[in-house]
Image (cartoon, rainbow, N blue to C red):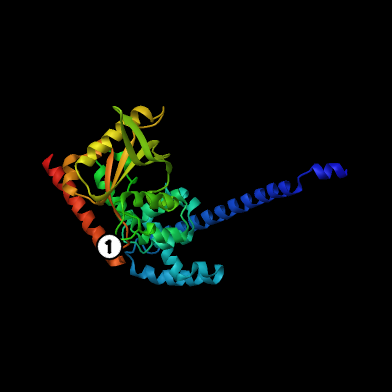
Amino acid sequence: MGEELTQFNHHKFFDELSGLIDQSKQKLTFAANSTLTLLFWNLGKRINEEVLHNNRAEYGKRILEVISVQLENKYGRNFNEKNIRRMVRFSQDFSDVNILPTLSAKLSWSHFIELFPLKSKEAKLYYANKAAEEVWGIRELRNQMARKSFERNEIANTQMSTFKPDLLNTFKDPYILDFLNLKNTYLEQDLERAILQELETFILELGKGFAFMERQKRMIIDGDDFYLDLLFYNRKLKRLVAIELKLGKFEAAHKGQMELYLKWLSKYEKTEGEKEPIGLILCAESNKEQIELLELHKDGIMVAEYWTEMPSKLELQQKLHQLLTEAKERIARNTLNV
C-alpha cells in the first residue's frame, strides 16, 4: 500500500482535478454572462417596441420610469432606470439578432456599456466583433477605442475595398508604434530591433492571427542576396505577410522591391493550401497620390504610415478625420473616372 502511494503522483492528480473544476466554473460564468446579456437585449427590445414605440411616444417615457422603479424594487440595481435605458439602446444599436448570440457568448454587459457612447453603429459593431474575436478585456477595449482602431482600419480599407475584399479589416493606417519608445533620431535597424523587443505588443497592434516567422529573411535571386525586414504568417487569411520598414517617405521603387519579395515567397515559401503572400510597407510618411497611381492594392500590397508618438486625443481625432475624408474623396474621384 505504501509503495502504491509513493508511485501515485498526488500533486499532478490534484492539479488535473483543479483544472476540471476551474474550466467548469469558467464555462458557468460565460453562460451566466451570455444569458444576462441576452435578457437585457430582449427587455430593451420589448420596451422599445411596445412602450416607447421606437421613441415616437412621449407618454412611453413616463411609463418607462414607472416600470424601471418596479423592476428595481423587485430585482435590484441592475434594473434601475439608467440601465433600462441602456438596454433599450442596446437593442437599437445591435438590432441584428443573428450576431447577438456570438457576441453575448464572448462579451460581458460591461463591454457593451463601453460601446454605447460611440456615435457610429459601424464603430460599435467593429469594436464588438474585434473584442469577441481577439478576446479583449475591458481595459484593452478602452485602449483600442482611445487609439482609434476603427478609424485607422477604415482608412486602410479604402486601399483594399475594390480589388481585395477578403483583406478588409486586416490592416490599419497609420500604425501607432509609441510603445517602441524610439528617440527622435534612429536607424531602420533600430526600428526593426525595437519591434522585435516589443513583439507581443506589435502583434497586438497588427491584430489577431499574425504570427512572427523570421527577421531579415534571406532570398537569393540571380546570385544576389536580398533581405526582407520581417516575415509573418496570418492564420486567419492563410497567407504569408511580408513587412518592409522605411524611415522616409514612400517611394515608387518600394513597389518593385515588395513585388519581387512576394513573387519569391510565392514560389519558394508558400505551401499547399495557402493563398498568395501579401505585403505591408510601413513608411514614416506616405505619398497618397503615388500609392493611388501605382495601384498597389491590385498586387496585394498595403502601404501605411507608422507614428512613433501618440498624438493628443484631439489631434489624433483631427488627423484621422482628415485622412479618412481624403481617402473617401479619392475613391469618389476614381469611381467617377471609371
| Residue type at tag 1 | Gln
Quadrant of the drawing holding the N terminus: top right
Residue assigned mark 1: 317
Tell me residue 59's x, y (percent).
36, 70
Image position of 284 (left or right of 59): left
- The residue depicted at 66 percent of the width and 48 percent of the height is 20
Where is residue 185, by image quadrant?
bottom left
Tell me residue 36's x, y (percent).
52, 58
Where 117 falls versus 100 (above or below)?
A: below
Where 236 falls versus 69 (above or below)?
A: above
Where 327 falls versus 277 (above or below)?
A: below
Q: What secondary structure is marked by label 1?
A: helix
Q: Between residue 7 and residue 260, name the one nearer to us.
A: 260
Is any atom of residue 198 visible in this view? no
Q: How many marks?
A: 1
Q: Between residue 53 and residue 286, name the one nearer to us.
A: 286
Quadrant of the drawing holding the C terminus: top left
